Amino acid sequence: MNLDLVNNLWNDLKENQFVQNFIKELSNYLEKNLTHNTEISGVDNTWNNLLADNLEINNKKIISKYKDEMLLERANILQNYALKTKDKGEMYYIYDIDTNEKNTYNLCICEPNKSHEVITKKIEDLPEGTSLGSILRKKGEDFILEKEDTRVVENQINNMIKEKIKEQDQYLDSKRIDGHIYKAGEKYSGRICLYDLNNKVGGGIEEIEEIEFPKNLYETAEKGDKFIYLNGEYQKYE
């Protein structure tokens, strides 16, 4: 093969504006996905919308109790990291897309006394490559994308989520007690509230948000129906 011909062809391609734009977009895509899509022992290393209704992570339903714990732990991770790296400047975290303004992110300031302040910024006003879960710093009037900080915090958050999912599994297993009778409450999105009639807590009946209820029973279950847990499964209690 004529090497001069190959070199000339490559130089022509590099000078083509369309090819340059394509290479730039491809580089941005690979950089973003290498940062955000590495797996951590069963939990994708991606941003998870912990504010989502009926939260699911990797097709795993998360009950309200552990959703709240995840949100609290995420706030602690952000605040601790912001304190640890305070010499780099005030730290911001992109936690949501604003529902009132198109193409706008919601940011929080990662400091204990400012964590409830919401800042909205147009996507085009933020650094290239910014996405949900990004860590930003304020430099003068501009925001700077901190890629390494984003990676570190993302790892910490996703490791926390993995541990909380394990805790949730253990918690729910402890509430499925052989021989206990449960009364059905509300059901929604594959979840059903059960009241353990054999386990009174503080003078009341304990409520459990069950996410692994048999599909055939779930479809016909009505509020007030009773079920018994026997041999590792729920059965209709007559």
Image (spheres, rainbow, N blue to C red):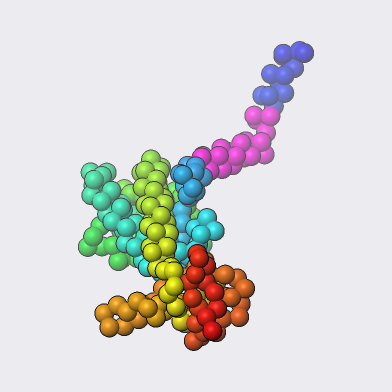
The stretch drawn in magenta includes residue 80: no
Residue 94 seen from this side: no
12 w.r.t. 203: above or below: above
The stretch drawn in magenta includes residue 26: yes
177 w.r.t. 132: above or below: below
Q: Nearer the viewer, residue 137 or 207?
A: 207
Q: Quadrant of residue 20?
A: top right
Q: Position of residue 28 (x, y in %)?
A: 54, 41
162 w.r.t. 10: above or below: below
Residue 160 seen from this side: yes
Give me the residue at 54% from left, 74% from top.
235
Give me the residue at 48% from left, 71% from top.
229
Q: For this view, does 158 lie left or right of residue 141?
A: right
Q: Quadrant of the C terminus?
A: bottom right
Q: What's the magenta region?
A: 13-34
Q: For this view, does 87 lie left or right of residue 184?
A: left
Q: Nearer the viewer, residue 46 or 179?
A: 179
